[in-house]
Amino acid sequence: MSDLIDIGYFGQPGGNSYVEQICPTGEFIKNIEGESSLDYLKKLNFTCSDGTKLSTIGSNSINQPALPVTFSMTYDPAMDHIYGTSDLYVSQLFGNGGKGGNNNKKTTLQCPAQKGITGVYANYDTAIGNINNLGFKCGDVKPSGVPISKPGITILEPPNIIQNNGVATSGDSYVVELLKKYWLLLIIIVVFVGIIVGIIVAMSGKDKKVSNMSSSGSIIGPGPV
């Protein structure tokens, strides 16, 4: 495990329970299942690509109401980055979870090239069930799990299914993430295409009018003398 690379964490120091878990050599974190209150993540379960289940992070305290939000995310090949939202506690992973507090900060953790996320660590509070901080480690993965990377796009993220109060809704997908990032460019392209189409239509109408006038001129002529 000495070749694992700690890529950092989101959240703040604190908590009274620490856990660190690593997938078997060559394997990567393939599935993430989570539960949260309307504010913060309460429980996370990670499964490796070989089916190994890592220990639960977080705790659903008996003092907390029933958790209204659950989600499940699956990645194959491996993730080469992960982003989350946090303030005093961790509230979201890939946009899934609670709304957090007033000082939310979105943080992206990125693996080096050709590395995948293979390990996770966290500090959490067993009394209130909140996750104070959540970090990840990257390492070498089996050839079939090597992340697919493109310039500016580090992974093809499938839709994340969020179960919110019994109603399943779609979380941020790969396409949605692109739209959020490039919405202004998309608007400029749409306007530009609209202008080009308008010019083409106008020119086509003008040519048709000239053609009709030419045809009319050939019919209306001087009569026989």
Image (cartoon, rainbow, N blue to C red):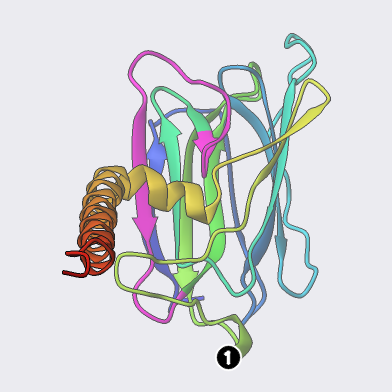
x 28%, y 61%: residue: 212
Estimate the x, y position of residue 225 in percent, counting from the top left: 16, 69
Q: Is residue 42 left or right of residue 107?
A: right
Q: Which residue was labeled with disc 1?
A: 143
Q: Residue furthest bottom?
A: 143
Determine the image quadrant of residue 115. bottom left
Q: Nearer the viewer, residue 164 or 82?
A: 164
Determine the image quadrant of residue 76. bottom right
Q: Is residue 143 above or below residue 58?
A: below
What's the magenta region?
92-115
Q: Is residue 223 left or right of residue 172?
A: left
Q: Nearer the viewer, residue 124 or 184?
A: 184
Estimate the x, y position of residue 2 in percent, counting from the top left: 45, 77
Q: Secondary structure at mark 1?
A: helix
Q: Is residue 134 left or right of residue 181?
A: right
Estimate the x, y position of residue 6 in percent, counting from the top left: 39, 62
Three-letter code for the amino acid on which mark 1 is drawn: Pro
**In the image, residue 111 lies in the stretch drawn in magenta:** yes
Instruction: Give the class, few, some or many, for how many residues have Cα within 10 Å of label 1's Cα (few <14, many ≥20).
Output: few
**In the image, residue 40 lies in the stretch drawn in magenta:** no
Estimate the x, y position of residue 154 in percent, counting from the top left: 40, 66
x 51%, y 21%: residue: 99
